[in-house]
Amino acid sequence: MAADNTVLFKKFNETRDVEIRNELVLIYMPVVKYVAMSLRNVYAKYGDLDDIVNEGVIALINAVETFDIGRGVKFETYANLKIKGAIIDYVRKQDWIPRQVRKFGKELDETYNTLYTELGRSPTNNELAEKMGLTKEKFAKCMADTAGSMTLSFEELLYEDNFSDKGGLANEADRSIYEKELKQVVAAAIDALNPKEKQVISLHYYERLKFAEIAKVIGVSESRVCQIHSKSMLHLKRKLENYIKM
């Protein structure tokens, strides 16, 4: 973040002046256009570019208002992920995911965060199931059912192939900076997973294998692969929380 923008953020944090906020939004508008273009294959069936840009602008405003310069993260990366998340959430709302699956996913996310804070570590599946009042069998089935929705939520955060587009950012140098920073953040989050989780993430997102194919490779059931994937997504969201939410 350039020095003059740091000054603007400090002034905004101190005054909450709407004019300063709007100035920052204008400065970072190219990030909205960049993300909107990079995700065009994701939202093509669900909305046009204007709809997506509108969602992105709302997310950018929120990013400016919630950004804390004391957390040691770059605003460009924070805003990029916030905008991506908003656009993907928009797509999810247009999608076929059943309401019960959405409901379980939300409760799972909240329970995971609660237990992580209480325990100071990632909770086990048994701990999550007990906290949610579910049998191990019911919890495992629900975890498997959420795998598809979690893929949609995080695919574009984990997978950076879409950054081949040249449009949106002011120049090639800016684009390279965004790519490098995002890849470093995501790589560090993936590296914190356990070996089995890393294997599933690698095979699914980088090798592009389906869950059924991964099951054959690692010698477990497809349902178990879905469970591992869903748990991995919870880990990754926690590791990326400084960028995804504040």
Image (tube, grey):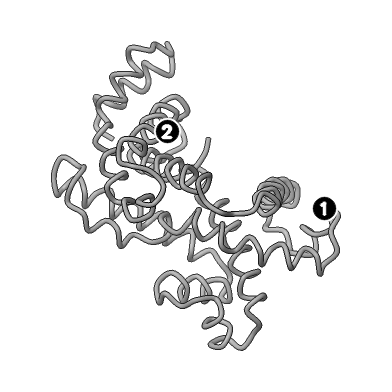
| Residue 34 image offset from top left, x and y in percent | 26, 44
**Closest to the observer: 234 or 122?**
234
**Visible residue check, residue 117:** no
Relative to residue 104, is residue 76 depicted above or below? above
**Visible residue check, residue 106:** yes
Residue 131 numbered mark, or none: 1
Say which element carries label 2. helix
| Residue 6 image offset from top left, x and y in percent | 31, 26
Q: Which residue is mark 2?
A: 59
Residue positioned 42% across, 54% down in the render: 157
The amino acid pointed to by label 1 is: Lys
Looking at the image, residue 93 sits to the left or right of residue 10; the answer is: right
Crowding near pointer 1: few (<14 within 10 Å), some, many (20+)? some
| Residue 56 image offset from top left, x and y in percent | 37, 36
Residue 65 numbered mark, or none: none
Gap in Å between the C-alphas at discs 2 and 1?
Answer: 32 Å
Residue positioned 18% across, 47% down in the render: 167
Looking at the image, residue 117 sits to the left or right of residue 151; the answer is: right
The amino acid pointed to by label 2 is: Ala
Say which element carries label 1. helix
Looking at the image, residue 151 sits to the left or right of residue 120; the answer is: left
Q: Is the residue under label 1 in contact with that under label 2 (CB below 8 Å)?
A: no
Relative to residue 13, is residue 246 depicted above or below? below
| Residue 222 image offset from top left, x and y in percent | 62, 79
Residue positioned 57% across, 71% down in the render: 197
- Closest to the camera, between mark 2 and mark 1, is 2
**Closest to the observer: 1 or 232?**
232
**Closest to the observer: 214 or 123?**
214
